[in-house]
Image (spheres, rainbow, N blue to C red):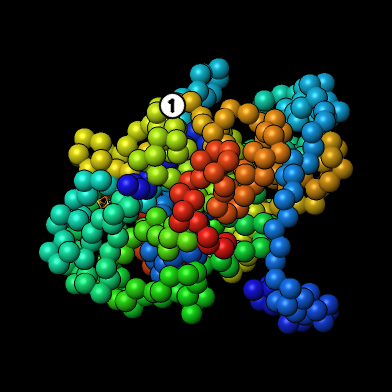
Amino acid sequence: MTNYGLVIDQERCIGCQTCAMTCKQENNVPMGQFWNRVLTVGGEHVDTPSGTYPEDGESGDLDMNYQPTACQHCENAPCVKVCPVNATYTRDDGIVEIDYDKCMGCRYCMAACPYNARVFNWDEPEHRPEDGTGDVAERPQGVVEKCTFCSHRVEDGLDPACVVNCPADARIFGDLDDDDSTVSKYISEYNTEQLLNEKGTDPSTYYVQGKMTPGRPWTSDKLETELGDDEAAQATRRRNGAPTSEHGPTPHVPAETAGGDD
Amino acid sequence: MIRYIWPETNPCESFYDTLYDRLVEQGTVHIDDDPVLYKGEFDTPTGRLEIYDEDAPTEDGDDIDGEVSLEVPDPIESRTDDDGDYRDEYPLMFMQKHSKWRIHSQYEYQPWVREINEQPQLDINPKTAKRRGIEDGDYVRVFNDRGQMIVRAKYNDAIRPEIVNTDQGWWERDYIKGHHNNLTHMDICNATGNFAFYDTAVEVEPAPEDLDTSKYTESNPRGSTPDSAGGE
Ligand code: SF4
Ligand code: SF4
């Protein structure tokens, strides 16, 4: 079975908000709404640290980190359980998705989701540009919407848009059920945390903290210059979101579903 | 997209039209390119890119003596000031750092980016602000002899108490009043032979109470203002 998951390396993340922006573009997310938010861990605002500025020889305690947060695609998803009309459901590949035709806008799922991952279209959705963007149809007023792991891309053998476009290679997508996938390797080799683990939701999104991973394109600790030609070509293809062959590091989206065009 | 980027009035319109038509006709191509451009050593003591250099040229300020110093230097204008009290009047140094939100003033109008980075703000150390009776999120007046601007204060412990910052690139229409370049000067810095925009002396005070800030009253779900997400 395929069970998709996402690893976000918080040691690599530079808080650039590219994932938040590209998500809006790819998924035609209305104005005023975000499926993918980059929060700041530290001070009160975006881009402020905790602690105080060191003065007169004091040692500094300034500390700041970024927390990119979207739907965690929980394996034990409370939103799925509370939906009275089964509009929110878990697909066979682990992606938690909403059937917008069934959603009646009761917002039970928003109350149940501990990650604030869902947004509700209170008004007629507005887009910039006005005709909308990306490859996904707009959702009507009165429904709840959220991150889909870019299921429309995944079905075409492409990584989600936030993964492809992260300039820090901090986001790695793949099959958690495949021990050879990059996500599985990173989860076993690095210290990863699931958000609000105590809630028993078992998110499919894992955050690397502590030691930094080599990032998205590589499963080795080699530098790009040290990769052989084959590996380098694979890495470039992966960086561009294109499917890779069975040689080299394991593709993020299984090869048999590949065939899309970026 | 490309048609959209090049304005109608561009003198080279026909040139870009040709490019655009070729792009539509021929499509794009993926080139397997080696993205690492520089593999050799730089001409520095370590052979690496060096961010901090003990021997870099410095300004000859009174309190610097040609040495690298971590003190905030006396502003250029107070060094050339006749009675020397410019610094007392305007004790804060005003920077306009580059931000991740724009390239200079380009993309200032991007509605998606503006949902996160809504309006100009003044990064100010909470100590500096409190001494002036300024709360986090208050509108403040930043001024010197040349001019003023009115922006929203953002408490930021990462900024040292003697310095304040507003990101460069905002347009005049983005300000409640004034503009950051009303404050800057055209004095030349000895070290670089260029304008010393960061070497600008200012003072900050709470904005007048009757200020019309209605252009930014809609509640912004995100952004760097106190009522937006981004804590936790
Ligand atoms: S795009 Fe990557 S580096 Fe930028 S905020 Fe998102 S996860 Fe972090
Ligand atoms: S993060 Fe929220 S919306 Fe996503 S699966 Fe978990 S409970 Fe549901």
Task: Identify which residue is drawn at 60% across, 64% down.
Answer: B108
Please state the total of marks drawn on the protein image.
1
Whether residue B10 is visible:
no
What kind of element bears circle 1? helix
Q: Residue at x 79, y 37 (%)?
A: B38
Camera-side residue of A254 and A239: A254
Rendered-image quadrant of the N terminus of chain B: bottom right
Side (left or right) of A73 relative to A253: left
Q: Quadrant of the C terminus of chain B?
A: top left
Residue in the image at 15% along x and 54% along y? A81
Q: Is residue B62 left or right of residue A145?
A: right
Report the residue marked by disc 1: A189
Residue B89 sits in quarter:
top right
Q: The residue under label 1 is which amino acid type?
A: Glu
Crowding at dot 1, Cα within 10 Å, few <14 / some 14-19 / many 20+, comes out as: few
- Return the x and y of residue A32 as percentages of the image width and height: 39, 66
